[in-house]
Amino acid sequence: MHIAILARLAMSGLLFALYSPLSGQTNEDVRSSQDTTSQAPAYSTWSDYGGSSDSSQYSSLAQVNRSNVRKLQVAWNYPTGDGNKYAFNPLVVGRTMYVLAHYNSIVALDATSGKELWTHPTDPKTTLITNRGINYWQSADGSDRRLLFAANNFLQEIDANTGKSILSFGENGRVDLRVGLGRDPNSLTLVQSTNPGRVFEDLLILGSATNEEYESGPGDIRAYNVLNGRLVWTFHTVPQPGEFGYDTWPKEAWKTVGGANAWSGMSLDEKRGMVFIPTASPKYNFYGANREGANLFGNCLIALNARTGNLIWYFQMVHHDIWDYDNATAPLLLTVRHDGRMVDVVAQPGKEGFVWVFNRETGEPLWPIEERSVPKSDMPGEITWPTQPFPTNPPPFARQSFTDKDLSPFLEPEERAQLLKQMKGAHNQGLFTPPGVTDTVEMPGNNGGANFQGGATDPVHGTLFVVSKDLPSMLRLELNPMELVPAGASPEEKGRATFQSNCGLCHTAERTGKPSAGPSLVDVGSRLSADQIRDAVEHGRGPMPAFPKLSGAALDSLLAYLSHPQRAPVASSKETETAPPSLPPEKLRYRSSFGFMFTKSGLPAIAPPWTTLTAYDLNQGTIKWQVPLGEVPELAAKGFKRTGSHFPKVGPVVTAGGLIFTGTRDSKVRALDSSTGKVVWEAKVGTALEGTPAVYQIEGREYIVFCAAAMATTHTHDVPGHPAMRGSIPGAYVTFALPAGFPRQ
């Protein structure tokens, strides 16, 4: 499809596609269901990530309900045994629970008592694992039971009964996920996602988590055979020659451009054999002169044949994304009554604050979607798409503008004055204001809106629930510092440019760190030896990816800068605003020095609520209710209790008992009435929470387990330099149930 044709489709509000002959579609790819709707799963177990393969985060268990939830008490807890940060969703198969603990080890527990059954250890220093969840597969007769996960870019399996590695899988028990992407595997620093993908029949369907740079790996969707690790199919999210969508990129982009990946989660319609995959932005996130065009399949919801990988339909939520507006939440499958008939739909919450709802089979929107004109970029070489899609229904769940009238009431006078001055000089034209070399307000910010695990459904009533955060960002584009190093520069000056080019995104140009991104490195030269820093850069450390390309002189200069940063002060912004005239625009490498708009206290600059839980009636396309979710302990102690928590990445679970269970970063777990949003029970646990709880039943007793092992129990702990950012945290899996003598199901 040519770009000109795409433009006409976009202007007519029809930029979605129901298969194209280029995809190899067959009549078997979609089975008609005009007379029937899909049967809802039993939802009574928790052997899938998020509870079920359709990402509903719903349980049909109802022993715990509105009338007795206040009687919940701790049944057992299991300490993680380390200071690592986890947002893990436990799996429960039969009487066994599988969790992550002990420095990224997989641990099997007795799900009724928390007694440890076995541990599969990993290297505590270097292992980056799928720390939000893992997958379970068993043969038809149940004799072969496996756990699937990825660690350090290698897909692996272990025996679910014993915890021992299955060495017949792949090569000596591992499949290298860097192989088969059309790039030098040694050049790919990050491929695996922290989300586990989905198991369908004998396939494991995986996305990836490419890094955030220009040279990112491609975001291919791939399916592997569960028994032997063989690659079965690949879907290229940056299309190659002859593939549908190829003409929405420059001709050679598929060789160099990365991203457009699926890191956040995916959902299966097992009856139809369809997998629904949300994708992220192409890379680089905030400047796209090297990728002119609409950039399919970035920022799309893609429906594929789960057995073959063939395209069925797609919809692109953001054309030529330069805002990092990933589809960061798994799509949710449910059935609603629309125009007098039952329709199987897929709903996709987004970072930009919209909920998109489509007919599951055809990709047709349930309500009109309008292509509206948006501001044009004035950056050299940047050709922004003239329009962006706006759903006319349902209404957005997040605020989509931020002005001086929206500033937090908790600001000190001096800081308020500084923010007012900054915002007065910033570009601020609302949603889809393109970033430039001067400050640009982005609202919702690129870490705002809905994020991973942030959606849940009540499939019985056609209700969708979305957790979201309002967190504005301030964007500013600067030339890659490596392009501005003068001849004869000192090792420290070269190292400063190397640092800003490779490390500044997470640690900031000033090395002060960012909440939930990277720690402060202000004094790293006195805390770590040169060999320790070199090892972390070359091999990665915890969530930090490896940078194997930084070797020799570049790495030496980086070490010199980190040891003596005073010898190379941070470059002024004026140094980075003028492009070298010898480079054509498509070769310029701008980077964003974006910052989440936190105040000195660590709280967002915008007025609360900072986190909300929104309930939608998708039969009508309306909001039923919206409430703040969580609180900030310091403010709650002063009587400000409806602020919402801050910086949440939590997932709700809905139950047939009329409840929504979730945790928040204020170290509390809660149950809300699903019909009103009112909190009906809460309990304090030892540590902040991220991720999604699990709900399960054994011998008629219902349990709810929370992973209480996230960093930062209060907002001040997110301030760079705070001791809690460096110290270890106590973590535990905390499990609740009604008293032992309570009547069972």
Image (cartoon, grey):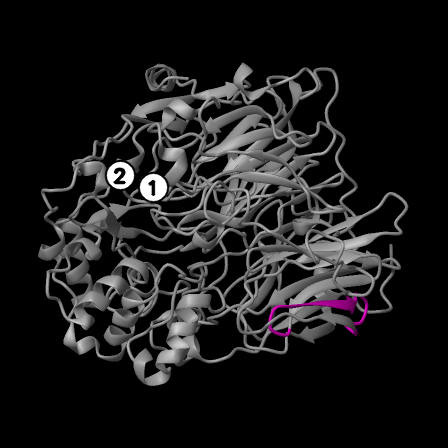
Residue depicted at x 64% and y 74%: 102
Q: Is residue 586 above or below residue 674?
A: above
Judge the density around disc 2: few (<14), some (14-19), many (≥20) Cα neighbours within 10 Å.
some
Q: What percent of the width, then of the height, locates residue 214?
A: 33, 46
Outermost residue on the front side: it is: 552
Left or right side of 394 for 407: left
Judging depth in this view, the residue of 165 and 384 nearest the camera is 165
Give the spatial CA distance, label 2 vs label 1. Answer: 7 Å
Q: Which residues are magenta?
A: 102-116
Is residue 74 among the parts visible in the rendering?
A: no
Q: Quadrant of the N terminus?
A: top left
| Amino acid type, callout 1 | Gln
Point out the residue furthest to the bottom here: 526
Give the residue number, with chain letter if any, for mark 1: 400
Picture coordinates of residue 223, whole percent (x, y): 64, 39
Mark before the other along the chain sequence, 2 or 1 = 1
* Amino acid residing under circle 2: Gly
The quarter of the rendered structure image containing the C terminus is bottom right
Left or right of 203: which side holds 365? Answer: left
- In this rendering, would 434 be left or right of 82? left
Q: Which residue is mark 2?
A: 430
Above or below, 593 against 440 in this view is below
Does dot 2 land on a helix, a strand or a loop? Answer: loop
Mark 1 crowdedness (10 Å alpha carbons): few <14, some 14-19, many ≥20 = some
Identify the residue shown where x is 73% and y is 62%: 98
Image x and y of residue 429, in percent: 22, 38
